[in-house]
Image: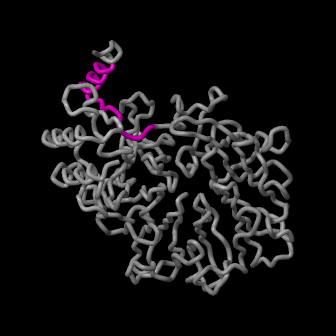
Amino acid sequence: MQTRSARAAIAALALAAGAGVACAVGPEVIISDVAGQASAGVPGFPGNIFSSFDRPFRSPDSSLWLISADTDLATTEDEVIILGSGVSWSIVVREGTPVIAGQAELNGLIDTPMGIRDDGSFIYATNTDAATTMDEVIVRFDAGSGLFSVVAREGDPVAGFPTEAYGLAIDSPGLLDNGDAYFRATSTVGPALTTEDDFLIRGSGVFAQAGVTVPGGSIFPWEFFDVGDYYFSSDGSHWLVQGDTSAATTIDDLVVVDGSIALMEGAPIPSTGLTDIIDLNGIVETYMSSEGDWMARGNFATTEIDWLVFNGAIIAMTDTLIPGIGTGESYSDDIFADCFFSMVSNNAGDIVFGAVSDNPDTSLNGLLLLRRNGLTSLLAREGDPVDLDGNGIFDDDTFLSVFNNDDGFLTDDGWYYFTADIRDSVPTTFGQAFMRIRAFEPAPSCRPDLTTGAIAGQPGYGVPNGVLNNDDFFYFLAEFSNGNVGVCDLTTGAIPGQPGYGVPNGVLNNEDFFYYLAIFSAGC
């Protein structure tokens, strides 16, 4: 029996379909900067709206996220930090408000790199309104106490190196599971030589020092460390640093993972079999997930081919066919010189990366791609429609425009959160939004549990009940015979350990049948 509201909803959808208006299955807008939209309003400031969004960051377990944004408030109070979970969020820091409650010092401009723990504790860097000799600070919020504190301040002694004081640059902060903060501190003040006054800090001590620390596999010490390229896994057992050593300028740019050189300017990518060397300044960007998986992208010197690596293995290169999307497009750097513009992974090693294709329509050539279980698929494309007002229908004349470089993250339960410019059908770009899109559906806790009973039309038919028995087997058999792809398409291949095992491919065949037999026999 249907309720009146249910019948009304069905009728509304039918009318929408009859009118040629598509129901929305695509990016979900969390916050936007489009005047007149509810998603653009700044809480607590009626009439004010957001004006842009920076890079979002997730907690290690993916349950929380953090992003900074600009608003159209006065320039002394317009930047904010937003803490969220799913599509719910609130402002937790605002420029022009006290760093620590009850004290006079005010938050200033907020740096891009930030960090957040599973309990809601977070860390950020800001330039306060204090005297210019002490206004650069790293600030931590402790979720347990509900209090803010200053972790490091310009002019204070360097952690573990008290003869030096922090200088004009302290940035790139993060938090480990145990509460330790880490960050970069350059051009410190004190007796140290200028070749030795850049530091990486972890907890209460120095993790690396320019002019002193020598990366594993090199004979040259670090010369400087790149901003934003200092990562740890959340448990602190894995780490990544990018920077330059004192070697010749043709071979001085390095990516070091867990103490050893992983990539080096002027050298081939190890273990790939390729002989071309990484170009001068050819390591464009790096990344490490909370699990410790690492990624990098860049380009070769001779061929000028752009590449993307995951844990040292190349997973994409320009001038090669983009697999799994069925359009015949290839990765291309004809329009965008670096081809690849973003890369992230979750704790399971699933990857979302951004690339530009050779699609002749340059308004459709920006792609977000999902790589999962060794298979690549299309997640979103420039030009895809966006449900801006959240009414469930694509009726806003709004489409994805430019994906913002590296501004996204992937959760363990299959959501990809990202920022992108948005445009109309002209096409004219008219705003930006922080959105999420379903990258994949998380696997059920007991995948072969498909039903409560095996009699069609009876209550519980097709509803998992946490019990695996013959009803599940006969239900699968019946639906397989009926050609029910939605239920029975479970895998690409039936050989464990091979790419596509356990990954649906839209085709129902014997591979799915034998895969179900295997997981049913294995039990839960």
**Residue 425 visible in the displayed image:** no
* View extreme (front): residue: 469
Residue 502 is situated, as x and y percent measured from the top left of the image, at: 30, 54
Q: What residue sits 71% from the left and 76% below the top?
A: 210
Above or below, comparing residue 465 to residue 132 in the picture: above
Above or below, comparing residue 202 to residue 452 in the picture: below
Residue 344 is situated, as x and y percent measured from the top left of the image, at: 48, 57
Image colouring: one colour
Residue 450 is situated, as x and y percent measured from the top left of the image, at: 28, 39
Q: What residue sits 72% from the left and 80% below the top?
A: 211
In the image: residue 513, left or right of residue 466: left
**Which is more toward the observer, 439 or 276?**
439
Above or below, comparing residue 479 to residue 391 in the picture: below
In the image: residue 379, left or right of residue 135: left
Q: Count the numbered circles shown.
A: 0
Above or below, comparing residue 113 to residue 430 in the picture: below
* Magenta-highlighted residues: 9-28
Query: Does 39 appear in magenta?
Result: no
Q: Quadrant of the N terminus?
A: top left
Q: What residue sits 52% from the left and 68% below the top?
A: 284
